Structure formats: C-alpha cells, structure tokens
Image (tube, rainbow, N blue to C red):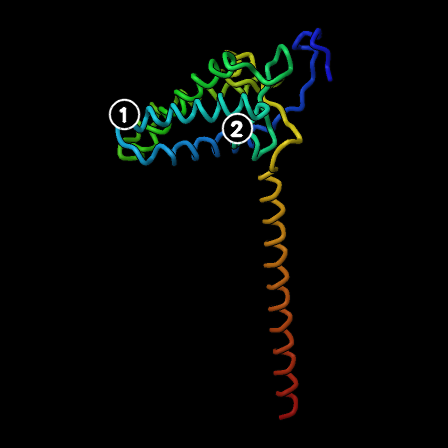
Amino acid sequence: MYSNQLPPTDRRFPKVPLDRRAYAFLLDFVTVWFLSSFFQGLVKDLVFFGIWLILRIIIVGKNKGQSLGSWAFDIKVIDMRFLRVPGLQELAKREAILGFAAMLAMVGLNINFKNGLSMLIFITPLIIDCGIAIGDEEYNQAFHDKVGNTIVIQTKRGFSLDLRLKKLWKIIKEKIQSRQTKQQRYRNDDYDDYDDYDDQY
C-alpha cells in the first residue's frame, strides 16, 4: 500500500478504462431509471434522484466503495487523500452533482427525439461532467470526482461482467464458425457425390 504521506501527484493508481467506467455508470443509470419508471411527473424525478443517492452513497459507503455497476465491472471509488472509501460527505458532494446530471439526462431521454433540442439541453450537463474525465490523463477524474476529491480505480473485487460477456461472445462466435465450417464441408461432400454420380452416366 502506498504511504498516505505521498502527495497525490506521486501516487500511482490502477487506472480504469473509460469504457468500463461508462458501462458501470450505465448499469446504475438504467437500474435507477427502471425503478423510477413506475412513477410519473415530478415524483418520478424525485424518486430517481432519491434512489440514485441511496445506490451511490449509502450502498457505496457500506459496500467498500462499490455500487451495483462498480461491482459488476470491478471498479471502486476511493478518497484521493486517504486512499480509502470516501466518507458520506465526500460521496454526497460527488453524487449530488452526478445524480442531478443523470436525472436531467433521464428527463431528456424521456423527451426523446420529439424535441431534439430539449433532449440535447438536458443531456449536456452529464456529457460535460463526464467528458472532463477524458481530458484528465493522470487520474481520469470527472467534474464530480474533482469536487469530491475522489478517483475511480480498478479492483479485484467484482463480477467482471464485461470480461464474462466477452468470453461468452467468443464461445458463441467459435460455435457459429464451427457450425458454418461443418455445413460447408457437408455441401462439398454432397457436390463430390454428385460429380461421381455424373461420371457413372
């Protein structure tokens, strides 16, 4: 473990690929969106925001820095200063920002393409917040990370959902290719038999 005395710039953390972080966020987002979809109007927005805070603050605080999405993709959030799970205050700072941006994005996606401009306006805060992580080459901190003084790192604790899906897809692909090869072989054998038939007559 790295010493807590080291300044943040001298510490090295296992960086998370941005696509894996995006998948983890998407899983949390879709889960909360689904649970809030049983409500309508302003209540739906408030329920979304409330569930988001529960999932991303209380559960993360109790589950070693992992929400459902983080656990599924082997990542976790830590306090950059103390190298531990952030306290509720730090989590509240980052998730109030991200949760509000996610709620606006949910509203925009509900509008859909019926009003493309409104949808874009509602989604923009989330794009800006998360897009800042792309420009941060050192820690991939989004805006909400910078406010909460947190970073997202890889961990061995999780389900490795993306790796399992890749492995499953590879197996399915190999089976499809194997089946196609067998079918092609059978066709070639049939043609050979047909040629022999022609030679006899």
Could you say which quadrant of the image residue 179 lies in? bottom right
State the residue in front, 101 or 192: 101
Q: Is residue 89 left or right of residue 184?
A: left
Give me the C-alpha separation between circle 2 and circle 1. Answer: 25 Å
Q: How far across and down, in percent of the image, does residue 52 sit?
A: 43, 25
**Residue matched to label 2:** 67
Q: Is residue 126 left or right of residue 16?
A: left
In the rendered view, would you say 13 is above or below 169?
Answer: above
Q: Earlier in the sequence, mark 2 or mark 1?
A: 1
Q: Residue at x 52, y 33 (%)?
A: 23
Q: Quadrant of the C terminus?
A: bottom right
The residue furthest bottom is 201
Q: Amino acid at mark 1?
A: Leu
Q: Quadrant of the N terminus?
A: top right
Which disc, if any, is residue 56?
none
Q: Secondary structure at mark 1?
A: helix
**Residue matched to label 1:** 42
Q: Residue at x 73, y 11 (%)?
A: 3
In the rendered view, would you say 31 is above or below 169?
Answer: above
How many marks on residues? Answer: 2
In the rendered view, would you say 23 is above or below 132?
Answer: below
The residue furthest front is 62
